[in-house]
Image (spheres, helix red, strand yellow):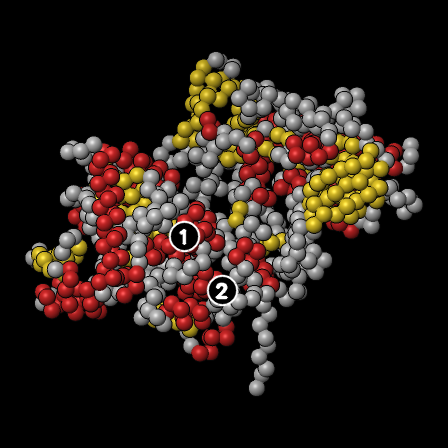
Amino acid sequence: MVENSKSVLIIGAGIAGIQAALDLGDMGIQVHLVEKQPCIGGRMAQLDKTFPTLDCSICILAPKLSECYRHQNITLHTLSEVDKIEGSIGNFTIDVLKHARYVKEDVCTNCGDCGNICPVRGISNFFDADLATQAAAQIAFPAAVPAAYRIDSKKCLYLNYGICGLCYQNCGADAIDLTQKDSILTLDNIGAVIVATGLDLAEDIHTLNIYGYQKYDNVITAMELERLICASGPQSGHLSRLTDGKHPHKIAFLQCIDSRTHNGQMYCSSVCCMYTTKEAMIAYEHNNELESYVFYIDMRAGGKGFQKFLKRGAEEYNIKYIKSKISHIEVDENDNPIITYEDYETSEIKKLTVDLVVLATCIIPSRGINKLADVLKIDLDHYDFVKTNPFLPMETSIDGIYTCGCAREPMDIPRSVAEASGAAARAAEVIKGG
Amino acid sequence: MTEVKPKKTLLKDVKIFKNLEEEIIKPHLCCACGACVAYCSSQEFDVINMVNFAPQFISDANVDKCKECGVCYYICPQTEPLIQQLNDKYRIKDELGHIRDVLAAKTTDEKIKEMGQDGGLVTTILTYLFDRNKIDAAVVSEYDENLLPIPKIIFDKNDLLKSSGTRYSLSSNILPLKDFYQIAEEIIEKHPQIYDINQIRMAFVGTPCQCRAIRKMQLLNIRPTHVIKYVFGLFCMENFDHEKLFKLVKEETNEDPINIAKMNIKKNFFITNRENKVYEIELKKFEKAVFNICYECDDFTTKYSDISFGGSGAVQKNSMVVVRTEKGEELIRDLIINGYINKFIPKKSTISEWKSTKINLFRRMTKMKTSKFEGV
């Protein structure tokens, strides 16, 4: 460990924040990694596979998660938010609001006894795109890091009504501590800050009702498909329809949902063309009789090996690409979605009945970004992404505060990782007095 | 002798089942809804059960198994906790509760018309919910051959007709939910789309006190009621003790329960036997069979429901409908649009006049319900 006392604070522990933390930690720089959720890993942990290699997402990520947790130079603050910042580049003082977990992180053995006895049920799990439910004593997924349960303070009977306390009674390790309180941790001598708050998705803010989302159960979002098709997801990877449990044979993938439109976000979400083909490929691997239809405006596959990937999809995975514009979606008496669209090749209005519709919803900035930008006093762009200079893409409007990944603009995993290393390098310059 | 390990607990001064026994069950204030037993059993604590419409410790040996979590005391419809929160949540300010709409309607289904009590509405709504795959099960009650009401969870609309019509003696409608986790297995077998037990959707039909218990449990999000999506309330003036009721019926009509086809309370008690003979008996004669607690209840129209149903105030062959929540309003609208029910349109007065007459009637009925207590 290089001897210096300045540290870097990273906000957001998704793949970008984790990569930046590991880079800096390996350089011998002290890192505080602040994450709002009870566990780290972010959106990448939710994905089934990554493109264009079709590697298992969590298999790549999990070693990084535990490395981050064990790293002697990285201090992890989960369930935490940045509350206040003072000072300037080279010497920030930052208040971190740590929400109580009500479980002693270092004592919990992740056995699940608290979750089993907790009488509160039916609380939706964000990690499973709200397709599965939990008790008030909960963990997002069994391999979560840190591997500790937490108590949902909004739903816990003890914290709200002073009754129950069953988890406390049942915990063999004495890890439950319902007397914990939210606290403010003041960190001084922070040399630089990296904003890696990542993304949310269009379905979080829009109803998407012209596509029948939330009205018809057989219209799902791409993130929901990722969870359903994932072996550790709610359906254990046996993709089936939410209405009747049947395996779909015809899936339609609709591109540019809520992106590139005056009615939603005006920008391109950048990763959907690729992940859609990836999802159609994985689905095909689950069922070789599958027909996939991708309804697209134009294919934006600008990356190394991306065109080849699409070609492979069409040739080997029975994917048909239809250049088109969707009008609307209805369902027939068997809940099969019927898509009405204009075929751009022939300019005809056509209909197609499928078993399942998957919406490639637009990446939007993390919904906490406005509050955070107010705290940090950094500028956001027109769409609420962190504003940067095209030639200094890691730098925000405040000296010493850097950004990377989807906090800046929609991008895929390899680019997020590359930018994270870039932001880490810029932060290291500050610390090492470059 | 083994030393009893002191219970590890955080709680201070929390009321537990022993308090429920002292304050509610022994003084005969228990309405036998079954909420406490359903909760405790679904937690697999093996502490209490229901015997002769009274919750009690399974045996002396089970007393020590009580975890003293205090949830049973909280969710009991006859205790004080959570009532204020419920009233705030459901915007209840007076004895009639929050009313979004009042209407009268009847079923369009001929079979239900025959079997149902008034307009056959509850049966029709449950049929619709099953038809449209909006519920996987419903908690109802049906008669055994001696007209003893048996609370039951049904999975199929074909089982619905058995539960048509009103039963006037007590039925512990929340009790069958104690076996939720066993029943859930059966439901999941029938519905391959359900991959998580907690996804099951049920409708609940019950009296004011039972619906109050369900709402208390829902407020806490606790099992097994977290699966209940619709709460349908029944107008309730009083409830009878089965044994006492049919002893009096026998005295008055010389009919055994097995020979009775239908019972209906309007102004008087109407009893129809299997040969279609109708007896009309003064209600007062049955007063002795009424549960004491019903005289202390001020809820006639079931304040804590999504929709409440009853015969009072409806012209022949219609049921009165009190819509209380947005969910209930949507459902009634869908039923009308899809032709499951016909809405009654008053001819002699404007709709708003008609509605206020009905609301006034409900107010009078509620007053009657409470004043009976003063008279006793």
Residue flagged by tag 1: what amino acid is it? Arg
Please report, as a chain letter, where disc 2 is located. B
Q: Nearer the viewer, residue B321 or A428?
A: B321
Q: Is residue A249 left or right of residue B361?
A: right
Where residue B219 appears, as percent x and y from the top left, is 46, 52
Image quadrant containing the C terminus of chain A: top right
| Residue at the disc numbered 2 | B70
Is residue B354 among the parts visible in the rendering? yes
Q: Residues within 10 Å of mark 2 (few under 14, many from 20)?
A: many
Q: Is residue B125 left or right of residue A231?
A: left
Where residue B164 appears, as percent x and y from the top left, is 23, 52
Look at the picture and state if B89 lies above or below A137: above
Q: Which residue is the extreme one toward the bottom?
A: B1
Gap between marks 1 and 2, in whole Å? Answer: 17 Å
Q: Residue at x 46, y 21 (%)?
A: A327
Q: Residue at x 25, y 62 (%)?
A: B374
Q: Nearer the viewer, residue B272 or B32?
A: B32
Is residue B131 among the parts visible in the rendering? no
Q: Is residue B231 left or right of residue A424?
A: left
Where residue B375 appears, as percent x and y from the top left, is 22, 62
Callout 1 secondary element: helix
> Which is more N-terminal, label 2 or label 1?
2
Residue flagged by tag 2: what amino acid is it? Gly
Q: Residues within 10 Å of mark 1 (few under 14, many from 20)?
A: many
Where residue B226 appears, as percent x and y from the top left, is 45, 52
Q: Is residue B301 left or right of residue A94?
A: left
Q: Quadrant of residue A228?
A: top right
Callout 2 secondary element: loop
| Residue at the disc numbered 1 | B215
